[in-house]
Amino acid sequence: MHIPLTNLSIGQLLPLVFVTYLAGFLYLLFIRRYDKYEKEPVSKLILFSFFGGIVSVSVATFLYVFIHPKQTFFDAVFLVGSVEEFAKLSSFLILYKFIKKDFDEIVDGIIYIAALSLGFSVIENLFYAMESDYPYKLLAFRFLTATIGHIAFSVYLGIALYIHKKVHKNYLGLGLAFLLSTLAHGFYDGVIFQPELNMFFLPLFLFLIWMSFKLLKLAYAYSKMKHEMDRNSFTPKDKVSLKCCHCGSSQVKEYEFKKLAIYICESCNNLLIETNTFRSLIKYYRPVLNSKSFYKNNFRSGSFYLNPQETIYYHSHKKRINAELSSLKQWFDVENKNDIKKYQKKIPGKIFKYLGLRYL
């Protein structure tokens, strides 16, 4: 990354700056959608992204005064990746006090480092566009590749930083996170710099995105901010013409929970949950689980009990779950912990464990 000189006039430059930051803002809103348990304030994310971008670009620019990488695979990994990921890490630490009060759950680590990475990328994209003969075309391309890439590079830092600041001193985790971010960034640039490696760009790019989503799902699994499935959290709607699978009563009323329709039998107090709604609850309370495989392996073989206590029942004919509320809450909690244990045995899980997740 370098800051170019440009011959653009103010009239040409202002629309370019506006489009660049507008696209960045829309990207930020998209990222915020993934913060599904306790959304961060939009204003705080915008400011952190803006100032994080300025500080990180300034740090990187200062370092590049002394470091002059060539466009080779080696320099991409060992110079470009390390400089720019160090710039993001140091900038996060410099600006941490600004978000300290809102930085209260593990997913926030990913959300805020993503916001900072976005700010870095927006400014970098603007610099490249100022040099291009086709600035808007270049911006569109870089927002689909480099911007997503910058976010994917740095997710490891977000997890390690949260644990270091809020859970346990995590120097080993920070070191590993910096190494992973540097390698991800360096390999991304490296396959672009070396023409004979260009063919590996798309699979590498998709792999980096896949890894970042894996870590995001694991962070959700560890999150303590999930909304409790509590009767007081349900918003009453209307009575419906359903029969309870448990007691056969027609005294069934519709409730809303997390914008999902859940039915409660007022005779036996059991929940009646349609399979599509239950799948949404699975994604919310058991984020690591592959819900598609779970349904394919379990919900096509007829009626069955989901738990040994036989209080959560899938009625295959009615395509509906019938469950005691307390049993369902316990089942989600226990199975989520089991999902984490199983995932920790896989290679990504073993790597992520040493980012600091072992302290949770």
Image: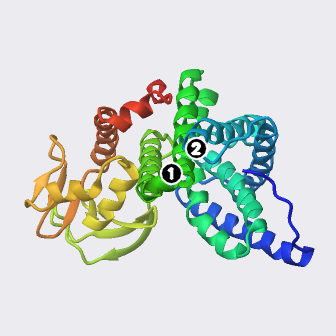
Q: Position of residue 182 (x, y in %)?
A: 57, 38
The residue closer to the viewer here, 77 or 325, is: 77
As drawn, 335 above or below 111 = above
Tally of numbered tags:
2
Per the image, the residue denoted by label 1 is 191
- Residue 107 in view here: no
Read off the residue under disc 2. Answer: 154
Q: Secondary structure at mark 1?
A: helix
**Quadrant of the rendered structure where residue 91 is?**
top right
What residue sits 58% from the left and 44% below the top?
Answer: 154
Name the residue: 45% across, 67% down. 259
Q: What is the x, y in percent for residue 93?
A: 73, 34
Q: Residues within 10 Å of mark 1 (few under 14, many from 20)?
A: many
Left or right placement of residue 87 versus residue 156 in this view:
right
As drawn, the label of residue 160 is: none
Question: Which callout, 1 or 2, points at the residue further toward the start of the chain?
Answer: 2
Above-or-below relation of 220 to 303: above
How far from the left and from the top, in percent, is residue 177? Answer: 54, 33
Task: Return the residue found at the far left.
Answer: 302
Kind of residue sitting beneath label 2: Ser
Q: Which residue type does callout 1 highlight? A: Val
Residue 314 seen in this snapshot = yes
